[in-house]
Image: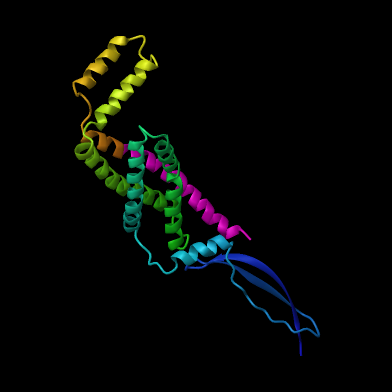
């Protein structure tokens, strides 16, 4: 009877279901007086990756549009809350701080959405797919937040836009930003007093396009980070 000795090395493998394994590769050599039992044990690259997969393994895969619409609702409500604190920030330092913190946390929310979508698809999403998902995410988010802003500008506080322009003119006057051309400042003050300010619809559309533009740039950067994270999971021991 011939008994064998085995030497093991580990190789990272990504299965079709998205599981990350470190699989043993055995080299068998004859060795007397030893009983050898070879067992391959699947392990995740790290504990966090295992938790991520277990959170989404029972969810069905969704298209980019469907996933962006679903997360767009959540993120749209997030933007609505941020807008409420932004409105209250004129009279409250606390609300101003909360609004700023919520603004800084937007990249974290987008990263979580992209990471979840990538894990749901077995870490097989391309950079372009994640980028497109991010753009559509900001599109649906902007639709919800723009609706809330329009309702506020038209029905809740119709003077909000005018007050904002008056505050901007007063700030420019206090900082002497137009000291070389005071006639321009007077023209701005006169225009605001006469009500020559942008309409609620124009302000909403402008903010929507601003969100879309900067959201697309942010989505490109975060999509790259997500794919770098996915690659590192395949090489991390």
Above or below for 20 versus 110: below
**Left or right: 6, with 40 as reference point:** right
Q: Quarter of the image holding residue 84?
A: top left
Which residue is depicted at the point 34% across and 45% down?
81
Is residue 226 one of those drawn in magenta? yes
Instruction: Give how far across and how far down residue 88 sits, in percent.
Output: 34, 37
Residue at the spot x=32%, y=47% of the render?
141
Which residue occupies 31% across, 10% down? Answer: 182
Task: Tell whether 95 sits left or right of 184.
Answer: right
Whether residue 227 is in magenta: the answer is yes
> Can residue 6 be seen in this snapshot?
yes
Q: Residue furthest right?
A: 33
Q: Measured along the vertical axis of the image, is residue 1 above or below residue 67?
A: below
57 over 149 or under it: above or below = below
Q: Relative to residue 53, is residue 99 drawn left or right?
A: left
Q: Quadrant of residue 70?
A: bottom left
Q: Main secondary structure of the magenta part?
A: helix
Do we see residue 121 in this rendering? no
Residue nearest the viewer, comparing 195 with 75: 195
State the residue lying farthest toward the bottom: 1
Picture residue at 35% right of the left edge, 37% below the top: 86
The x and y percentages for residue 136 are: 33, 49
Q: Return the x and y of residue 229 as percentages of the image width and height.
A: 53, 53
Q: Quadrant of the C terminus?
A: bottom right
Q: State whether residue 2 is above or below residue 232.
A: below
- x then y, percent, for residue 40: 62, 75
Residue 69 versus residue 181: which sits nearer the camera? 181
Q: Which image quarter holds the N terminus?
A: bottom right
Q: Which residues are magenta?
A: 209-237
């Amino acid at each position: 009877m011939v008994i064998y000795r085995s030497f093991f090395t580990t190789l990272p493998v990504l299965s079709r279901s998205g599981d990350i394994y470190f699989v043993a590769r055995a080299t068998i050599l004859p060795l007397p007086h030893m009983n050898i039992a070879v067992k391959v044990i699947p392990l995740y690259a790290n504990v966090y990756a295992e938790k991520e997969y277990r959170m989404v393994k029972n969810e069905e895969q969704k298209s980019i549009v469907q996933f962006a619409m679903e997360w767009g609702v959540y993120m749209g409500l997030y933007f609505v809350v941020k807008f409420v604190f932004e409105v209250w920030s004129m009279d409250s330092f606390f609300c101003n701080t909360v609004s700023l913190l919520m603004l800084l946390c937007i990249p974290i929310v987008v990263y979580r959405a992209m990471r979840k979508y990538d894990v749901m698809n077995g870490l097989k999403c391309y950079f372009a797919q994640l980028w497109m998902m991010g753009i559509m995410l900001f599109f649906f988010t902007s639709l919800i937040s723009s609706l809330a802003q329009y309702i506020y500008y038209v029905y809740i506080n119709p003077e909000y836009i005018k007050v904002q322009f008056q505050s901007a003119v007063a700030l420019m006057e206090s900082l002497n930003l137009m000291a070389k051309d005071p006639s321009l400042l007077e023209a701005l003050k006169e225009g605001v007093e006469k009500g020559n300010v942008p309409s609620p619809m124009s302000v909403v559309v402008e903010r929507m396009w601003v969100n879309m533009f900067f959201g697309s740039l942010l989505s490109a950067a975060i999509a790259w980070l997500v794919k770098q994270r996915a690659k590192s999971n395949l090489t991390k021991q």
